[in-house]
């Protein structure tokens, strides 16, 4: 019985260390907050990149999901740190509630911390007052050699005010 307990303690300790260290060296994509009233146009929503010390981010892609009963997608533009790194933006809308973005470059320039993208939405005239979730899914970040890096996601809800 004592051997089983010792093995279990070792396993739990190893798993805990793995979980804690797997998030230490990760880049984080954060959707900025925004608010507006029904009928408001061109609500800007930034996406920020924050790299952990030692992480070298060179490109990324993700899907942004939103509620089409409340929001209408207008455009997405590169942010200042992505432009400064010489990156290009490509995007499409595989379904009405998803915007798929890819930010890469034909270079190995690193993307620094800051605004990497800005999305623009219109709030529909008949949008109910409350929260509207904006979530990033299927995120992938790579280093200058194309190696995938760990990524953390922080989403937000757009507040629709009266």
Image: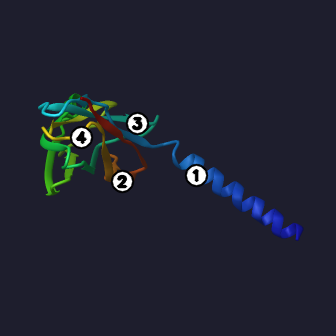
The label nearer to you, 3 versus 4, is 4
Query: Residue at (16%, 36%) from the top-left corner?
Result: 120
Compute the Cα span from label 1 to label 4: 40 Å
Give above or below for 114 relative to 124.
above
Secondary structure, mark 1, is helix
CA neighbours of label 1 inside 10 A, class few (<14), some (14 to 19), many (20+): few
What is the secondary structure assignment of the residue under circle 2?
loop
Question: Does 3 sit left or right of 119 as displayed?
Answer: right
156 or 61: which is nearer to us?
156
Mark 3 secondary-structure assignment: strand
Report the side of 14 relative to 150 (left or right).
right
Residue position marked by numbered label 1 in the rendering: 19
Inter-mark Cα distance, 1 to 3: 18 Å
* Residue 128: assigned label: 4
Residue bearing the label numbered 2: 147
Indicate which disc, 2 or 4, sits on the residue closer to the N terminus. 4
């Amino acid at each position: 019985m004592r051997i089983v307990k010792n093995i279990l303690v070792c396993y739990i300790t190893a798993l805990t260390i793995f979980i804690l260290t797997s998030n230490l060296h990760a880049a984080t994509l954060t959707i900025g907050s925004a608010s507006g009233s029904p009928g408001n146009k061109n609500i800007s929503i930034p996406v920020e990149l924050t790299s952990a010390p030692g992480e070298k981010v060179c490109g990324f892609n993700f899907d942004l999901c939103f509620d089409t009963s409340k929001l209408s997608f207008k455009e997405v533009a590169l942010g200042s740190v992505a432009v400064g790194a010489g990156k290009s933006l490509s995007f499409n809308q595989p379904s009405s509630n998803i915007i798929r973005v890819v930010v890469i470059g034909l270079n190995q320039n690193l993307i620094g911390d800051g605004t990497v993208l800005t999305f623009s939405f219109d709030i529909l005239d008949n949008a109910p007052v409350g929260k509207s979730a904006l979530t990033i899914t299927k995120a992938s970040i790579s280093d200058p050699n194309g190696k995938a890096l760990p990524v953390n996601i922080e989403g937000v809800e757009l507040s629709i005010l009266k």
